[in-house]
Image (spheres, grey):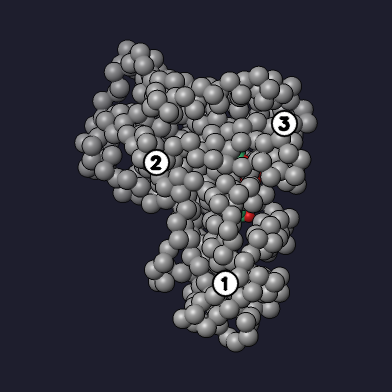
Amino acid sequence: MAGKWVRMVTAQTPTNIAVIKYWGKRDETLILPVNDSISVTLDPAHLCTTTTVAVSPSFDQDRMWLNGKEISLAGGRFQSCLKEIRSRACDVEDEEKGIKIAKKDWENLHLHIASYNNFPTAAGLASSAAGFACLVFALAKLMNAKEDQSQLSAIARQGSGSACRSLYGGFVKWIMGKDEDGRDSLAVQLADEKHWDDLVIIIAVVSSRQKETSSTSGMRETVETSLLLKHRAKEVVPKRIVQMEEAIKNRDFASFAQLTCSDSNQFHAVCLDTSPPIFYMNDTSHRIISVVEKWNRSEGVPQVAYTFDAGPNAVMIARDRKTASLLLQRLLFHFPPNAETDLNSYIIGDKSILQDAGIQGKEDVDALPPPSEIKDNIPSHKFRGDVSYFICTRPGRGPVLLSDKSQALLNPETGLPK
Ligand SMILES: Nc1ncnc2c1ncn2[C@@H]1O[C@H](COP(=O)(O)OP(=O)(O)OP(=O)(O)O)[C@@H](O)[C@H]1O
Ligand SMILES: C[C@@](O)(CCOP(=O)(O)OP(=O)(O)O)CC(=O)O
């Protein structure tokens, strides 16, 4: 293994949004949850992490750069993932480059890791989920580990619980497991992204000034103080998991939406039941819920599901493209962009939904009529600037390797960021 070679692998991994939430751990170090959860993987075209991992005998320590800045790998979560994946490394031979790494060599070789999130890291868009899933997936490829996606998910879980669900595309279940060592706490795919490809997802990134409680400390406080969480984990979630699996299997949007909204609301109720109470949603979040609830009610059958993680951003899932364009009209009516924001940066991702909604410019936003369900309730307030921007996306695929060398984030000669 001597020489000056650098071997590297680049991968791209999606983020995910839970429709049955994970909240509460029974083991903090291994990251073992108190209930199963189910998520939808989001299209990596709009939200994803790209990670390049490299190994070389010339590296003298493990190093990592996140979005161009060097970060410490000393934290327990990074160390757990690195240790677990190293212990599964196998022989690697690259005849073209004349590289031969024996299984036992991996203990002494150091790694360079560079990662980039194509969305804001601190905006509550589950960067840790895509990030840890990508790290583990890329390292497994680099080290020729023979583990399947589910076994890799149990390693990513030790970086961040929700990360285990980003090892698959489509619809994913994290099975809480029973074993004390956590080996059976892993993700499985329920259906791939093609199974239900009518769904359209619109994320409202809500402006928030307040500092939020991290998921990790928030759920610790909930486990310590909330009686409602015990009821949720024991009585409510197990039934909902069965119903949600059925709804996904049958593409039953009415049940899917009802379960998704109820579970998000119960998660936030559990936060409120924590002492001291945790508030993740803000007034804008509540207004978005009200817009969707009023519309769903007036239609008689749910058109859109909403769900909120540990922050004020709304993730809305529309039953199809037509519904998504009607939703976007409603959202833009209530939450038009600020004077200084142009429409092109206000609606990002799949902009074709905007065209479907018949909106070409800001004048079309100003001309939007009040939605029929609120017409009798004038005055209908506008909340200009309360949403930072919207991301239009859809369910998407799981992790992939990027073989195009130009997409690598590390220099192939030096192993340092490009
Ligand atoms: N691309 C990445 N690769 C590895 N780790 C990452 C990556 N992106 C984020 N992380 C890790 O995740 C941490 C951020 O996680 P945190 O849970 O605070 O925010 P979030 O996941 O963006 O939001 P939320 O969990 O509230 O949805 C970072 O400090 C870093 O440790
Ligand atoms: C509200 C959630 O998004 C909580 C996610 O929590 P994290 O996975 O970020 O927490 P740690 O395991 O402590 O890293 C719900 C969910 O994704 O299921």
Numbered disc 1: secondary structure:
strand
Residue at image location 70% in from the left, 40% down from the top = 32
Q: Are the residues at dot 3 and dot 1 in contact (C-beta closer than 8 Å)?
A: no
Element type where label 3 sits in the image = helix
Residue 222 disc label: 3
Q: Quadrant of the N terminus?
A: bottom right
Disc 2 versus disc 3: distance between alpha carbons? 33 Å
Question: Going 65% across and 35% down the picture, which residue do you hit?
Answer: 176
> Given this view, does label 2 or label 3 mark the residue nearer the observer?
2
| Left or right, 306 with reference to 78 | left
How far apart are labels 3 and 1 at the CA level?
45 Å
Q: Nearer the viewer, residue 108 or 124?
A: 108
Task: Name which residue type carries label 2.
Answer: Glu
Q: Quadrant of residue 323?
A: top left
Q: Residues within 10 Å of mark 3 (few under 14, many from 20)?
A: many
Q: Quadrant of ligand 2?
A: top right
Q: Nearer the viewer, mark 1 or mark 2?
A: 1
* Vertical order, 193 against 294 (above or below): below
What amino acid is labelled 1 in the image?
A: Val
- Point out the frontmost of discs 3 and 1: 1
Q: Which residue is mark 2?
A: 193
In primary-sequence order, the first of circles 2 and 3 is 2
Residue 158's mark? none
Q: Residue at x 55, y 30 (%)?
A: 20
Residue 398 falls left or right of residue 144: left
**Mark 1 — residue?**
92
- Tell me which label, 3 or 1, sits earlier in the chain: 1
Q: Is residue 190 visible?
A: yes
Q: Residues within 10 Å of mark 2 (few under 14, many from 20)?
A: many
Tell me which corner region of the image, top left, top right, bottom left or bottom right, holds residue 84. Answer: bottom right
User: First in sequence: mark 1 or mark 2?
Assistant: 1
